[in-house]
Every structure is written in C-alpha cells, then in structure tokens.
Image (spheres, rainbow, N blue to C red):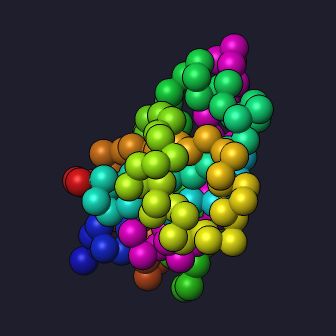
Amino acid sequence: MTDQTDLARIINSAAHLAVATLTTDGQAPDVRVVLGAYDPATAQVIFVSSPQAEKVAEIAAHTQAAFATAPVGQGEFVRVRQATVQSIPASSAPAAVYNQKFPQSGQYAAAATYFALSFQQAEVTTGGTTTTVQVEA
C-alpha cells in the first residue's frame, strides 16, 4: 500500500520539482523547476529561490501552488494539486533538511529565500497505480 513513506522516498529521490504558482496579476500559472527536499517532520517540501526572482513576488501575491516531481525509478512520481507556499527562516529545521540534501548548493542557498510547500494530500504513483495519500506531520 502506498503511504507517506513512498511519498517522502519519491520526492527525495527526484530532487527536481516543477512548482506552479500564479503570476503576480493572478491571470496565469507560472511553472519553474527547483530543487526540493521533503521534511517528514513538518510534512513540507522545501525549496529556495533568489530573493530577486519573479517567483518570490508571485508567492508574495498568491500563496496557492501546485507541484510535481520528475519520474524516478520505475516511473514513480508525486503530484500535488493544492498546496500553499510560504517563506521560512533560513535558520529553521526544515531549511536544514534542504541544506543537508543539497550541500553543493550551500553558497547559493546562503543568499536565497527558503520556501515551504504545505499540502494535505498527494497523488503518488508507484507500480503503474496512483493512490491519494493523506499527509500528516
């Protein structure tokens, strides 16, 4: 049975996530590929962005988001249709999860803004079957 363990494994195996937010005017979705790490303690996906990036302005204007991983292994992937995104302190425990997963991006991350994607459920595909997983911290 697919569960939160599969969710965490797939997200952390994929590394790259396609994160969609709304444009600042709210008229269209805007997707960017980011590096992401899943923090099982908070049930959030953590990513970073340059403070000057359009993505930061979009998040400030609209907290709605969606994301999906690239397929890993035998075509496994995660898709979240409804998430909220907010900035988090670089000194937080979830930010440390990101830094542990991506130590090579430390110099970039030191000057970046950290974000957390929070969500209640995810579509997790394993073995050709998609299951809706309820997410709890």
| Magenta residue check for 16 | yes
Which one is in front, 97 or 68?
A: 97
User: As drawn, which residue projects farthest toward the top?
Assistant: 25
Can you say which quadrant of the picture contains the N terminus? Answer: bottom left
Say above or below: 71 vs 80. below
Q: Residue at x 30, y 53 (%)?
A: 42
Q: Would residue 21 appear left or right of 125 to someone viewing this image?
A: right
| Magenta residue check for 79 | no
State which region is magenta: 8-31
| x then y, percent, for residue 122 | 38, 54
Asked whether the viewer can see residue 15, the reply is: yes
Q: Would residue 72 appear left or right of 85 to someone viewing this image?
A: right
Q: Would residue 121 appear left or right of 70 to someone viewing this image?
A: left
Say above or below: 120 vs 131. above
Give the quarter of the image for residue 51: top right
| x then y, percent, for residue 37 | 50, 62
User: As drawn, which residue projects farthest toward the bottom?
Assistant: 74
- The number of callouts visible is 0
Asked whether the viewer can see residue 123, the reply is: no
Which one is in front, 41 or 110?
A: 110
Q: Residue at x 51, y 35 (%)?
A: 87
| x then y, percent, for residue 106 | 66, 63
Q: Residue at x 38, y 67 (%)?
A: 7
Which one is in front, 43 or 94?
A: 94
Can you say which quadrant of the picture contains the C terminus? Answer: bottom left
Say above or below: 109 vs 87. below
Say above or below: 5 vs 26. below
Q: Would residue 36 appear left or right of 127 to someone viewing this image?
A: right
| x then y, percent, for residue 73 | 56, 85
